[in-house]
Image (spheres, rainbow, N blue to C red):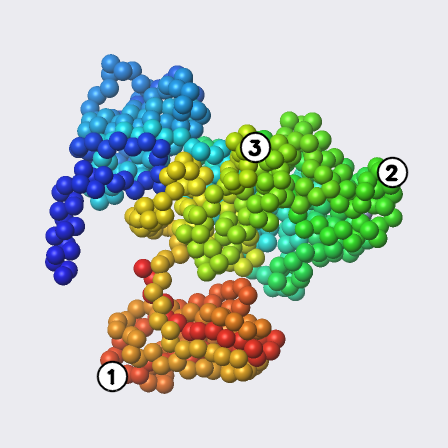
Amino acid sequence: MCKKFAMLTCLMCLTGLAFGQQINVIPKPSQVKIAQGSFNFAGMAAIYYDDNCSGFVNVAGYLQTTLRDQLGRTVKIDKLDASAIAGNAIVLKCSASQPTLGSEGYELTVTTGRVTILANERVGVFYGVQTLLQLRDDETGQAPCIEITDSPRFQWRGLMLDCSRTFQSVAYMKKTIDRMAMYKMNVLHLHLTDDQGWRVEIKKYPELTAKGARFPEKYEEPLRHQGYYTQAQIKDLVQYATMRNITVVPEIEMPGHSIAPLSCYPELSCSGGSFEIYPFFKGPGITADIFCAGNEATFVFFENVLDEVFELFPSKFIHIGGDEAPKSGWQACAKCQVRIKAEGLKDEHGLQSYFIKRVEKYANSKGKRIIGWDEILEGGLAPNAAVMSWRGIGGGIAAASTGHDVVMSPTSHCYFDYTYKAIDTRKAYSFEPVPDQLSDEQAKHVLGLQANFWSHIDREEHLVDRQLWPRLLAIAERGWSAKSVRNWDDFQGRVQHNLNRLEAFGIAYKPEVSKTVIGQWKSGQVTEEYAPKIYDITKFLNKAGTCNVHFQYTGGAHRLGIEKVEMLADGKVIATDAHRGVTGAFDQANEFLLEINELDEYKRYQIRAFVRSEGGIDSNGEVSLIKKR
Ligand SMILES: [Zn+2]
């Protein structure tokens, strides 16, 4: 059976692409024509760039660096002079006037001796390079002869990374930028401020980061989960992203989710404070205390902050949050009530609208546009504002039908802090950003789509990776490829092929999982104090290695807490993983890794887990051994 399979695989190697006529590029290009033969990178002499288009030299440099890692040698770079191309070469050619390609499109032609990438702008040639790098087979070092014409469906192919609830290191953000660029994503939205911390240095208000970026010591939060970015770091990050055609869109949240700035400047709240930032699960998800909209000082504060933010981020769009701002504080505040009366506003929703419109006016005066979560529709949308539709697609439809730009990122398909059980890759891939209700004209207002990652549940980089990948591939393809391309089976095949690539780039993606259930817990069977539960796994083990024990809540009113899991061999502890894990309405660190160095077939192996039911004893779930890929 195995032999037969090997022979078949080999046969397919020999006949190559002509046999299957399939390439594994993600996102799928618009037009592809595959020919016989291939281009061998090993025999390549040079990369030539056209000097008539600005920035092509930089893309040549990027390609040189990337190939150096892959080929183990530096290929020379030269300015394009058609008469002087010698040997096998990659040519980055400027077309400047191909209207169908737009700014991001490209034409890629691969023949046995030459690769030519034609584009109007730096961005297009960069994407041609990305496609070429995906076409190169790691094992053979060759790319098939091919003609590709390609351009994106949407201009906004985004990812929101929440850096407030959990600080994300600059190194991790750069890695994420590299990975997004490989798959032609082009917007990185950073959620920089929230109740859990203010993460961007503002020179005029040093307290914001001196105090507002650190959790109080009593919470014993690890240092890596807090902190802030200096302005120098932001500039460096933005430049890094720009080179990779990624626009960094900063989010400065207002008027809600603002405990971090209000802890520094409580006089800008309605009640006067005091306030203290807190880890997400140690306090309310939404706080009633928000910025006072009746106080002029609030607007002075935001204008000063935005002045520095505009300076740091060249992005045309600035995200101003606007979501989950309870109105009870404004109802009870004399200043806010005076404002409502003086401005002739209907109610507190009208006051939110006043707030956002006023900030928008300021942003517009500085040449910027604002985008906000769909709550900014309530009470009347600011005239030039764009909407990020997250509570479903209704907000997006409402905004697009009234001529406002929209980015679709509904919780149903695009929230990647949600589990794979709630949104698997297939579901993410099924998302269509343009609702049927919109006319062709209204549909033009759909700028694109975005995946959002909130960092309150999965807080370590490898866990963030797992939440993002491979789901982000689905968002990348839905953002780039034509609507007609959507084909799950075809996409899934390409994803499988890309898993090695994800691995090669160090992405701790969510693997396909095979699961062996070793036990259950049911309502009433687990106490509220930690106590051991034992599961025999002898019959499931067939070799030494890492044993991955997974606890999954399936129902009931209470969650399960796990403090330690041990591996026993004939009753003796041979491995321990002691950390706090939870499984319930949300899961946190609910996997435990136990190493078996040597498997003795005469011994009895058991898992001993110290668990408790939290808040009551109505909890159900199962314990499994999971094997990846
Ligand atoms: Zn107020």
Type of amino acid at the residue the image marks with label 1: Tyr
Residue located at (67% from left, 29% from top): 364
Q: Amino acid at mark 2?
A: Ala
Tell me the SS state at disc 2: helix
Q: Which residue is mark 3?
A: 442
Q: Closer to the observer: label 3 or label 1?
A: 3
Disc 1 CB within 8 Å of nearest ligand 1 atom:
no
As drawn, the label of residue 602 is 1
Quarter that holds the C terminus: bottom left
Q: Position of residue 334 (x, y in %)?
A: 87, 48
Whole-angstrom CA distance, mark 3 to mark 1, is 70 Å
Residue on which disc 2 sits:
342
Could you tell which of marks 2 and 1 lies nearer the N-terminus?
Answer: 2
Q: Quadrant of residue 85?
A: top left
Task: Provide residue 50's location: percent of width, then percent of height.
Answer: 35, 19
Q: Residue at x 43, y 28 (%)?
A: 104
